Image (cartoon, rainbow, N blue to C red):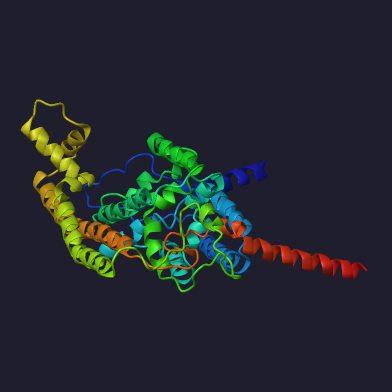
Amino acid sequence: MRKTLTILIGIIYSFQAFAVARFPKPDFTSGYQYPNIVHSAPYELFWNILDVVLLVGMMGLVVWAAYRKRSRTIILSMSLVSVLYFGFFRSGCVCSVGSIQNVVTAAVSSDYHLPWYVLLVFLLPIVFALLFGRVFCSGVCPLGALQELVNVRNFRLSRAVSATLTMIPWVYLAFTILYAATRSQFLICRLDPFIGIFRLGGDLGVMSFGIVLLVMSLFIGRPFCQFLCPYGALLSVFSALSWKKLEMTDKGCINCALCSVSCPVDAIRPPQDSKTNEERKKGVKRIILFALLLPVFTLAGSVLVGSQSDALSLAHKDVYLYEMLLRQEAQPELEEPLEVETFHALGGDMEELKAKVDGIRSDYSFYAYLVGALIGFVIGFKLLKLSLKRGRKTYEIDMARCTLCGKCFNYCPQNQSTRYTISNRKTIKNEKTIS
């Protein structure tokens, strides 16, 4: 009996670390202040360290598999591990995609503490992208890995449609920066289409969107990665400048076109003659025109988005509340919303709220012009890039788009002949050993 009581008391004390206040604390009028009590989450440091170690280890294995072994099997196994661990076990958080919001908030707010592991989760894939390309996108990101595992066939979109859709991640990134910098909301966390799948529950609309994306992934290679992911847009810039460039084979391209057909993200560019039918002067004039239009697009984007800063600021809860209060004062016959009723019940000061809202709208005005300039610059730069025509003698990988999925390795006949030769050598060696 005594042993049983001891065990029960131990269990009760162990659960006190996770206890939360069920009722509001009494409001003392004597000026007494409650001490700050911090409850540490057991083993959280261990899991954070394990996340970072696995992130680095898995990206390292992908580099080895892509650049040395040219093995899609290893990359697919990393995808499975990523979905099971980073996706379902760790519930998809904290991920590199969502860490953009934390980094931006920490950059503009001195009172926001950025955890060290969130900073590493944000920076490490960028470092690998500068060295080896979009290694994180291959099979380490659980969002991309989930799409890769369900993909069975790829229907190719036209270059014009694909080029247009690839602008969406930059717009998504721009508004993510805007809302994070103004402390309004974490847009990526609200709209993450796969977080509900990993957590087996959540907002029905967002989950439905995630299921639609998964169904699309059956027939289109990584639709979220190509046409939505804001972190993928960032990685594409660093990957285009990567130190090492991925090649389908080390035996030389024979222009069989099989790799281009197999690529799910249309990241393999076919050979083309540098000599085109148009006159050289005409091509140069077109490039100069788009180069001159680049600052025009940048300015136009800045003005367009900046002019809508007041409307965009409604995403902040205080601005939204202030507008509801003004509307209620102008039309008192309307039914009083719960937020307005709560504000008055708590003795809210309208003048104090107005001063706060003015500061928020000032921030919105500043950051809206910046993100608008970013959107305009990206559109102008995209048009400038499309106007460039560079000659290629063989099929080449576009490092900015390539997600290192490894599909092209299996389709390349040069790699198949290499594996066949290695297999024959092993067979001959074994036969000699037996004899």
Residue 110, how many percent across, how many down?
27, 65
Residue 394, how many percent across, how many down?
50, 66
Q: Is residue 112 visible?
A: no
Which of 9/354 is in front? 354
Which of 373/428 is in front? 428
Q: Residue at x 11, y 33 (%)?
A: 328
User: Does residue 7 sit above or below 408 in this rendering?
Assistant: above
How many labels, in total? 0
Q: Residue furthest bottom?
A: 243
User: Does residue 278 sit above or below 84 in this rendering?
Assistant: below
Q: Residue at x 72, y 62 (%)?
A: 420
| Screen quadrant of the C terminus | bottom right
Q: Is residue 176 visible?
A: yes
User: Does residue 235 sit above or below 18 in this rendering?
Assistant: below
| Screen quadrant of the N terminus | top right
Q: Residue at x 52, y 62 (%)?
A: 55
Q: Residue furthest left?
A: 330
Quadrant in which residue 209 is drawn: top left
Quadrant in which residue 427 is drawn: bottom right
Residue 284, how many percent across, how many down?
26, 69
User: Does residue 160 sit above or below 117 in this rendering?
Assistant: above
**Lateral position of residue 335 relative to residue 432, left or right:** left
Residue 151, how many percent across, how many down?
54, 45
Which of 12/96 is in front? 96
